[in-house]
Image (cartoon, helix red, strand yellow):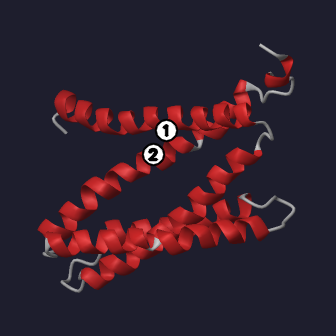
Amino acid sequence: MSSSFVSENKLPRKTKFFYGLSEMPISIANVPLTAFIPNYYGSELGIPLAFIATILLVTRLFDCISDPLIGYLGDKTNTRWGRRKPWIFMSAPIIFFAVYKLFFPATDGSVDGNYLFIWLLVFWLGWTMLLIPYYAWGAELSPEYNERTSIAAWRAQIGMVANVASKIVPTLALLLFAY
């Protein structure tokens, strides 16, 4: 192989691993949201499933606006912590508060489709503020094409392990402990 295709300045595996490790909680967080929320709001709170599906669709379509906007704003951000980290940091309280509101709604009958719509919209905005800068940051870790591919592969592989674990662990808990 020609030396023009091989980088002498590869990122250490440790750096790729710890960057990819951040994908683990992101991948795990998707499971309860997609598995629990529609069922809970439909069966326990009485919102029709077709309406829940419409809410989920519309709030995800909001990404058509929010993703490019956050990407643009992230590119224009200039702080001593870099362009991406402030957005990731700011996303945390938004996501935490939205998750709290989604998973612990009032049980007094006041929760309806509008409530679900608003808090899913807030959640997905925070999610966008987390993911768009995080993925862009990975692309900025190296100027070399093959190295960026390797960085993304580490992230994707660790995310896949987390996704599989998030499905296996509850199943094992159910089988082994009747939990």
Whether tag 1 and tag 2 are in contact, CB under 8 A, the answer is yes
Q: Is residue 32 above or below residue 165?
A: below
Q: Quadrant of the N terminus?
A: top right
| Amino acid bearing label 2 | Ser
Which residue bears the numbered disc 2?
A: 27
Looking at marks 1 and 2 on the same chain, the residue that comes earlier in the sequence is marked by 2
Q: Secondary structure at mark 2?
A: helix
Instruction: Give the residue at the far top of this rendering.
Output: 1
Taking the spot 54% from the left edge, 43% from the top edge, the residue there is: 23
Q: Going by the image, does 77 lie left or right of 88?
A: right
Which residue bears the numbered disc 1?
A: 159
Q: Is residue 13 visible?
A: yes
Q: Position of residue 152 (x, y in %)?
A: 61, 38
| Amino acid bearing label 1 | Gly
Neighbor class of circle 1 (other Cα within 10 Å; few <14, some 14-19, many 20+) is many
Taking the spot 35% from the left edge, 69% from the top edge, the residue there is: 102
Image quadrant in which you'd find residue 178:
top left
Question: Residue 109: which disc?
Answer: none
Alpha-carbon span between mark 1 and mark 2: 6 Å
Q: Going by the image, does 122 lie left or right of 15?
A: left
- Compare residues 67 and 128 and report the one nearer the observer: 67
